[in-house]
Amino acid sequence: MSNHYDYIIVGAGSAGCVLANRLSEDSSNKVLLLETGGSDKSIFIKMPTALSIPMNTDKYAWQFHTQPEPYLDNREMHCPRGKVLGGSSSINGMVYVRGHAKDFDEWQQHGANGWDYQSCLPYFQKAESFYLGENAYRGGNGPLGVNNGNEMQNPLYTTFIKAGVEAGYASTDDYNASQQEGFGPMHMTVKNGVRSSASREYLDPVKSRSNLTVITGALAQKVNLDGKKTTGIEYKVNGNVQTAHAAKEVVLSAGPIGSPHILQLSGIGDKDILEKAGVEVKHHLPGVGQNLQDHLEFYFQYKCKQPITLNGKLGLISKGLIGAKWLFTRKGLGATNHFESCAFIRSKPGVEWPDIQYHFLPAAMRYDGRSAFAGHGFQVHVGHNKPKSRGSVTIQSANPEQPPQILFNYLQHKDDIEGFRACVRLTRDIIEQSAFDDYRDEEIQPGKHIQTDEEIDAFVRQAVESAYHPSCSCKMGEDDMAVVNSNTQVHGIEGLRVVDSSIFPTVPNGNLNAPTIMVAEKAADIILGNVALQKANADVAMTQNWQETQRAAKI
């Protein structure tokens, strides 16, 4: 087998699968895709309701943990990342959120030129097949299937939306269209009852292309450089170190932990950090691994007066029946991630666009998928989504098999602490609206006794978990701490790019799969030298009096 290619892509995740598909469309391009994990052909990956299993399975995910987080009572936080074809799109919660239009305008303000909302929107559309069809915001013919699961059949989903409106917030039919702010149905990457991952939609249809080689079980060791020019990649497979040569470019799509780590292993990064780890410095680039961001969330849980929640479906017999129905029909409770309604609100007056996100779930569950208590309950996941705290991914040694040190510095910034106080108080206010009177029983978590700032802060430090949205560790821009330029090329190194969520300048207000796929679609055009898709001219609904008000019924 020849080891010479035009393009080498490292990581077959949300971005890497898109790139493998698009770069190999031209049969004259010879493309290699490397992935450390293996096949995604597991029922637990395919079946949406089984989402907690792959995420917690060593076979499918890197089970990273952070350093003790100093502002979370020194807790070591779980940070799983996909280690399978499809990457984190094969193990995630399948929630489809693009982010607010202003998030992408913010990218442009941070130096990512050409990544404003109107430039990105056509690429969101290109990637998507929305179940209600195409419009000025949504795509109708893209690879990625997006729907609303079971159309909110459980009455608690619509009750949550009604309660939000009662509390004085807007409703929105489609938070991924003109108006993110408000309460409404939630979308998920599910097609015909099956997880719509990047691997299934972008890689599976093109695997047979003669110009595309996919190698699984391959751990990248480093990028090979000749001076400041990239020549290829060194990787290990079945215990043997191999070299693949790239005539055009190497693209790192190993994610927010993997991509900065591979750069550092290659001698690209902050020289002091590299020297300390015993790595020869090839190119001093201080921003590599810095600017790390993530979302935190916790569960607000209530007991439910009526036996209508998913807590009644967790027994072996119920699970067996759900599984059997799904196997034969691809329908029912097996075909949804159960997050079918949601909200995006602003935490206080003076915040221009939403910074708090809700996922509603008609069950009271733990992170491992078990019941929170005996009986029926419901919960809403809530988190402050525009954090100001920043962390880092730092190489520990020149050994590629030693994971890097991860530290998010969660809640380091006082504004993030205040954001979570708002999460507690505003959520209580929503669930205590009369819409919930027929269902709401005792507050389980945090519990009514948690009232003061100090009590809320102590609860948050103990209760928050990562929403699994690490990003921004190789940020795009032109300043001294930027790692790639607006064309996704690594500053100062020829023939090397990074394309994944690590290049986001700031974390968007929402889940990350959708923007990661969008970034890869747009980057593919840049890499191939294609004319960019025509900028959109879509309206964006903004709260007019956001300086004075925290909630607005009409936007």
Image (cartoon, rainbow, N blue to C red):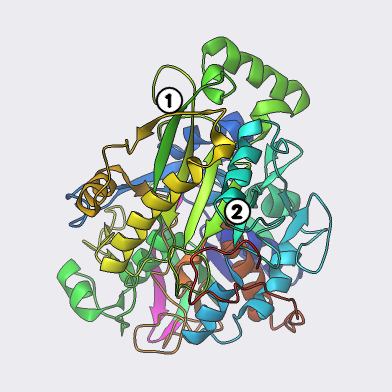
Q: Is residue 486 left or right of residue 382?
A: right
Q: Where is residue 44 in the image (x, y as percent from the top left)?
A: 57, 31
Could you tell me which secondary element the residue under label 2 belongs to?
Answer: strand
Q: Position of residue 107 (x, y in %)?
A: 51, 79
Q: Where is residue 34 in the image (x, y as percent from the top left)?
A: 52, 57
Taking the spot 33% from the left edge, 55% from the top edge, the residue there is: 421
User: Between 321 and 452, which is closer to the camera in this rendering?
Assistant: 452
Q: In this view, does 205 lie above or below 505?
A: above
User: Between 8 and 415, which is closer to the camera in this rendering?
Assistant: 415
Taking the spot 30% from the left edge, 75% from the top edge, the residue there is: 267
Q: Do the residues labelled 1 and 2 touch (CB within 8 Å)?
A: no
Is residue 315 in view? yes
Residue underneath mark 1: 370
Q: Where is residue 198 in the image (x, y as percent from the top left)?
A: 63, 52
Taking the spot 70% from the left edge, 70% from the top edge, the residue there is: 123
Magenta-colored span: 214-229
Q: Is the magenta stretch mostly helix, strand or loop?
A: strand
How packed mark 2 is, by other alpha carbons closer than 10 Å (few <14, some 14-19, many 20 or more), is some
Is residue 242 in view? no
Which kind of residue does numbered mark 2 sit on? Val
**Which quadrant is home to the N terminus?**
bottom right
Is residue 216 magenta-colored?
yes
Is residue 420 magenta-colored?
no
Could you tell me which secondary element the residue under label 1 belongs to?
Answer: loop
Q: In this view, does 436 lie above or below 510?
A: above
How packed mark 1 is, by other alpha carbons closer than 10 Å (few <14, some 14-19, many 20 or more), is few
Residue underneath mark 2: 214
Mark before the other along the chain sequence, 1 or 2? 2
The numbered mark at residue 200 is none
